[in-house]
Structure formats: structure tokens, C-alpha cells
Amino acid sequence: MASQAGEVGGSEVSATAKFPFCWVENDEFPEMVCTLEDQDLTGFTITLHVRRNDGTVLVKAATPIDLTQGHFKFSWAPGDMVFGFNQESEIQFVDGGGKPLTSKLFLLDVRKELA
């Protein structure tokens, strides 16, 4: 699965992949723009799950960009980006028949604001 800022997923590796961007606490930009290559996602529900370091889980529904080409994005609302490094994350795809496919685990970083 490719992303605007890098690649999430890919071949099997022993370490969990880290998303190649660090947000700042309370950021609402940039959006996470993703592509599931060679997949028509029409009719799928796509959801991001981020397990924050305090144990709470952020659940975000994807916004379609071009589902026939596998393009979608996640937008942030106030309070979504909470401080924490190595927050375990995954993207779940559920087809129209209810069959799920979950991405490999990846890590998100959110640093504290300076001011």
C-alpha cells in the first residue's frame, strides 16, 4: 500500500514499518493519502485504527478519492493527533459482503507542540 509520504506495507519484514512522517500534536494537516495498488475498492468500507500510547484507539473512516484505482485518504479532526511515538496502526478494508482484510501493522509518530 503506497502513501503520499512513503509506503506502508510491502514485503514481509521482521520489524514493524514506521510511517515516514511525524505529525505534531493537534495537527489537522497533512491528510494521510493512500493507495491499495491494483485493487478496485468500490463498495468497500475502509477504516484506520490507531492504538494510542494511553490505550485508547482512534478510529477514522476513509474518504474516497478514486476507489476504482484504490485511492483514499484519512483527514484529521481537532484532537485526533495525540502525542505519542510508535503508535500501532492498521487499515481495515471490508468488502460489500462483510469480508475483512487488514493491513500489516505500522507505526505512527506524533510529537508535542513546541508552543
Image: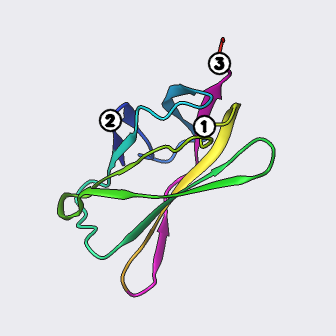
User: Label for residue 81?
Assistant: 1
In contact (CB < 8 Å): disc 1 and disc 3: no
Q: Residue at x 63, y 41 (%)?
A: 79
Foreground: disc 1 or disc 2 = 1
Location of residue 36 in the rendering, given as x and y in whole percent from the top left corner: 31, 55
Residues in magenta? 97-112
In terms of secondary structure, where does tag 2 sit? loop
Q: Which residue is mark 2?
A: 4
Foreground: disc 3 or disc 2 = 3
Q: Nearer the viewer, residue 9 or 76?
A: 76
Q: Residue at x 35, y 57 (%)?
A: 63
Up-down: is 103 above or below 13? below
In the image, farthest residue toward the top: 114
In contact (CB < 8 Å): disc 1 and disc 2: no
Compare marks 3 and 2 and give the one earlier in the sequence.
2
Up-down: is 73 above or below 67? above
Q: Which residue is mark 3?
A: 113
Q: Describe residue 82's horizontal placement relative to residue 93 as left or right.
A: right
Kindly identify the amino acid type of the residue bearing the numbered disc 1.
Answer: Met
